[in-house]
Image (cartoon, grey):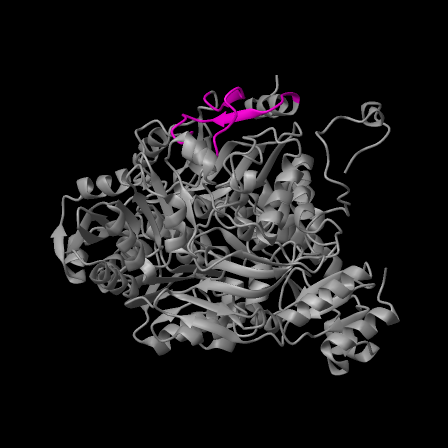
Amino acid sequence: MGVTGELVERLRSICGDAHVITQAHQLKTYESDGLLQYAVTPGAVVLPADAAEVQRAVKACFDHGTPFVARGAGSGLSGGALPVSDGVVIGLSRLRRVLDVDLVNQRIVVEPGVTNTEVSTAVSPGFFYPPDPSSQVVCTIGGNIAENSGGAHCLKYGFTTNYVLGAEAVLTGGTVVEIGGPQADRPGYDLLGALVGSEGTLAVVTRITLRVVPVPEAVRTLVAFFESPLHAGEAVSAITQAGVIPAAIEMMDNLAIQAAEPMAKAGFPLDAGAALLVELDGSEHECDARFTEVERFCTDARATEVRVAADDAERQRFWRARKAAFAAMGRIAHAYFVQDGVIPRTRLPEVLERIAELGEEYGLRVANVFHAGDGNLHPLVCYDRPEDGERAAELSEAILDVCLDFGGSITGEHGVGHDKKKHMGKQFAEPDLAAFQKLRCAFDPHALANPGKVMPTPRLCGEVPGPYRRHPLEEAGVAERF
Amino acid sequence: MPSASEAIAERLRDGEGFRIAGAGTKQGWGRPLDSDLEILSTAELDRLVSHEAGDFTAIVQAGVPVAEAQAAFAEAGQMLALDPPDDGTATIGGLIAASDSGPLRHRYGAPRDLVIGVTLALPDGTVARSGGRVIKNVAGYDIPKVAAGSFGTLGVITEVCVRLHPKPPGTATTVVRHDDPQALQRAALECFRRPLEAEALDVRWGGGEGAVLARFGGSRAAERARAAGGEVVEDDDVLWEAQRRGQRGDLVVRVHGLPADLARVLTAARDLGATAVGRAGVGTTWLSLPPATDVERLRVTLSPHPCVITDAPAELRARVDPWGVPEGPELDLMRRLKERFDPAAHCNPGLFAGGI
């Protein structure tokens, strides 16, 4: 059922009139997330103040059979928080309290609307929270949990899922469940493993216990320039083969440098074929020894120049160039698509060649920014004329096919959401998708939590199934079961 | 010809109920299974399918002995950073399904953190793959994490893709000894607080005294151990083998505590005449207890920390729930997960938490 007047009244009684939005012009704010090419106006938006209000709002939706979409900062890049037209958006931006900081045990308890950066701030200066998506100043921990967010430092430090110890969540029927807790590796199924990265399709998280870690003793950063990304790729191989796990290892190609440099003013040469930003952190001893090796590997791979950050200001400048890359694309193209695919790192030269070929085939420019250590590519497909938009989208999707051809994944950190669900069937076979559905049905048998995301086709859960037997109609090829 | 995974899935579907077994090194864990259950062995799944040294990943079938896989990885200077106690026979599938780990848990995480892809033979007769072959991947639900530690109760893990790490060229350990649990906790927290990047940070207790051990890896391991303070042991393998061995015994309870509550766990060990080994930074401690110990009372003493009975006589595991997961919404959700994957309870019926 959609958003009825009765449901709106009930939401108002829970959260107060000011926190239930139904006016068309106000609803527009919520019609897209960070992926603006999709827009759906929701039936209503509710902005609860705390976990209790979230629980009551979810229960109200459930009682009316109305789907709901949880939303953090709306900075996601896969349409994961795209509203459902006959549903309610539950905005969690008011749940932004840091509830407990326990530095002795290196834990922090926060509400889902707390931003990623605020977590590190709350435990600084001695500790920090490692997952660092580029949008960390605005994106929320609730959203990070939904997407299993990574960031530039996840090669060494891991992803959101490696830092979540516990969560309080509201299931579709309104049941509040405490999953995990302050202790690590608790007995029972790893429900947190299922919840983190589930893109809002299993439950709404209202309180999170996170692990934080000590700030490393030393950080060393360099940027090396190369004639081509292939040379830079050789340096990456040499570094990882030597057993070095850099805190971050990021690559930009020439087009990305040309876009970012005028904005970041990091002093990157505009004619460089590739820039490789390498950051090591850890103990002084280990860092210094390893850093010398890294410099040598870059030189051996024919780096045209290696610059070592002399101080924190210079380090920040290097990073500004990398982090500006997406936003700066506007300087060299009217519009662009950001892609997020993953390949086994060692296949980088072949994949770059394929992407370049595709660019030529489509007559479009593709800038490349990668998390080079873990093979996570962010090709930026540029176009200038609106009529080229469709072809650019096609090219961007063709790049995903290349990632899959090389044994990779259709998404490394942006999520499947609405945008990539049509590709799920290429990465996963029918029994794989059916297993995903089993998991989803265990949490949300009514399919009310963020419906229409992740899975390629809408599926119903039905009753708990008996052992699978082929139906006579299936045997006869008359019907298919989903 | 169906693949080995498909053959297992078909057996699961067509049979009544199975005891799932790798090498059988952890068959004594969990609630005792019905003794007349048919045994479903992963022994035939014995191939190391691929080792992509450049990508630090490997695909391994479930029945491959961990030791054999580690030997292959070591040839490339790599390791699967899981080092539970192992007599050389434990299989990869059993290791992952039982979520076993050793001292390296401190730095590299649990099996769930290192399994990037899993193939499951399911009781509906299908074979489902999830995750992938790349270390960064958020497509689809993270079933590899759910499968890790599920004790074979959702289906049979037939193949895994794991992330590997560089094997440190050298190691050195610093040891701080004390006979006071509070002092040991202080020493452990001091190591935990500092950004030492130790490979492992363990504690042990036995015979009225204990020690905190921090192990460093890399070309500068000894220097780093010296900088950390304490007595430095460069030839340290024996120390760590003893830590691993301490996780097994005749009656073992694994306590999932907190770093700042270590003294309470060690005090309990002292008072009960138990020996203990543990991950001081993770908060998990294994207590090896005298046979007559009242485990239920121990649970009360250490509340609210979960206490899992691992090695124990079948009689005890039948009488006292080894898992101790309380009734409530979380356990309900676990039961719902089981019902979706294994509705007729064909896989290790009754072995797991809450009688799953």
- Magenta: predominant secondary structure element? loop
- Residue toward you, A451 or B24: B24
Which image quarter: residue A378? Answer: bottom right
- Left or right: A237 as drawn, with respect to B329: left
B20 within the magenta span: yes
B5 within the magenta span: no
- Residue toward you, B10 or A232: B10
- Left or right: B269 as drawn, with respect to A108: left
- State the image coordinates of residue A20 (x, y, percent, origin top left): 76, 77
- Residue toward you, A291 or A46: A46
- State the image coordinates of residue B62 (x, y, percent, origin top left): 47, 30
Q: Is residue B145 above or below residue B151?
A: below
- Left or right: B77 as drawn, with respect to A330: left
Which image quarter: residue B317? Answer: top left
Image quadrant holding the C terminus of chain B, namely top right
- Residue toward you, A343 or A477: A477
Residue ID at (50%, 73%): A99
Please provide the residue range marked out in magenta. Answer: B14-43
Q: Is residue A309 above or below residue B23?
A: below
Q: Is residue A369 something one can see in this rendering?
A: no
Q: Is residue B157 something one can see in this rendering?
A: yes
- Left or right: B194 as drawn, with respect to A268: left
- State the image coordinates of residue A245 (x, y, percent, origin top left): 35, 53
Image quadrant holding the N terminus of chain B, namely top right
Residue placed furthest toward the bottom: A18
- State the image coordinates of residue B277 (x, y, percent, origin top left): 27, 47
Q: How many marks?
A: 0
